[in-house]
Amino acid sequence: MIKILIVDDDQMNCDLLQNVFTRHGYVVMAATSGSEGLKLFRKHAPRVTLLDLRMPEMDGLTVLKEIRAIDPHAPVIVLGGGATEVQENHARALRVTDFIRKGLSLDILVEAVHRIAALSTPLTPAPGPSAVGHEIQSIDESVLVIDDDPLVCDLFVQFLSLRGYRALGVTDGVKALRMVEKMPPDAILLDLIMPGMSGVEVLRSLREKDYAGGIIIMTGGHNEELLEEAWALGPQEVLMKPIDLERLLTAIQLVLVCREC
C-alpha cells in the first residue's frame, strides 16, 4: 500500500488529514515536528510527503533540504499557508513537487496526492474511499461546519462524514445563515474569528432567529472579551484550536443529546 507522510506542527491538521487519506486507502504517518518527520521519512520512505513550511525549531525548508539529501527525487507537496515569497522560492529551488496553499479546497490536495501516487505507481492507483475500511454507520443527525479556511472546513466535513454524520461546510457567515434558514442542522460547529461576518455576529443572528440546534464555538485566539461576548449568547461549548478530535466528537454527541432534554 502507498505510504504518505504528513509533517505539520498543528496536531489538528495532522489528525484530520490522516483520517481523510487513510479513508482513501493510503497508509498514513504523521509528525508534528521536523525532526520527528525526518525520522519517519528515513524509516518508511513514504511515496508522498505533505510538508508544512512554517514550523518552530526545524522549519519546513530545513526538513525539505534533509529530504533532498536522503532522496533527491522524493515527491514532496508543500502546504504553504502563511509562507513568504522568499520561502516559496526556496522551496521551488529545492524541487518541491507541488505547492498548495492551505486556504485551497481539500479536493485539490487530495487530487494532487492521487496524481503523484498514480505517476509513481501507474499499475496500482490509490483506491477510492469505498474500497477501504469498515462500512460507515449512518447517523440521522446533521452538522453544519462554518469556518473561513476552506481546507479546515473541508477536513472537518470529511471527518464528521466518516463518523456517520450528515455534514456540510460553508466558509462564509452570510451563506451559513441562509443555509440554516432553509434547512436547520441539528448542530453547528462555528469558527469565532472570521472576516466579514464574525462568528459572534453569526451566533447573535442565530439567537435572533430562534435557532433550536446546538452550537459549538471554535477559536484559535485568546481574546477574553470576545470569548465573554460569545458565551453570553449561549453556545453549548467552546473548543480551543488545535482541537482534539475525540473531544470534538464527545462535544457534538453531548450537544445533540442535550438538545433533546
Image: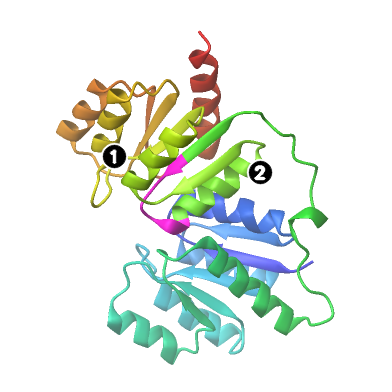
Nearest to the observer: residue 110 or residue 70 = 110
In the rendering, at what x and y percent does residue 171 appear? 39, 51
x 76%, y 69%: residue: 126
x 45%, y 53%: residue: 152
User: Neighbour class for label 2 at 10 Å: few (<14), some, many (≥20)?
Assistant: some
x 44%, y 33%: residue: 188
Q: Quadrant of the N terminus?
A: bottom right
> Which amino acid does the dot numbered 1 rest on?
Gly
- Residue 47 in sight from this viewpoint: no
Nearest to the observer: residue 54 or residue 231 = 231
What residue is disc 2 on? Answer: 162
Q: Which residue ends up furthest to the top in the rendered image?
A: 261
What residue is disc 1 on? Answer: 199
Cβ atoms at labels 2 and 1 below 8 Å apart: no
Q: Measure the C-alpha gap from mark 2 to mark 1.
A: 26 Å
x 74%, y 56%: residue: 129
- Residue 197 in sight from this viewpoint: yes
Q: Which residue ends up furthest to the right in the rendered image?
A: 123
In the rendering, at what x and y percent does residue 106 appear? 53, 61
Q: Is residue 227 magenta?
A: no
Q: Which residues are magenta?
A: 145-151
Question: In this picture, is 234 found above or below 56?
Answer: above
Quadrant of the rendered image containing residue 209: top left
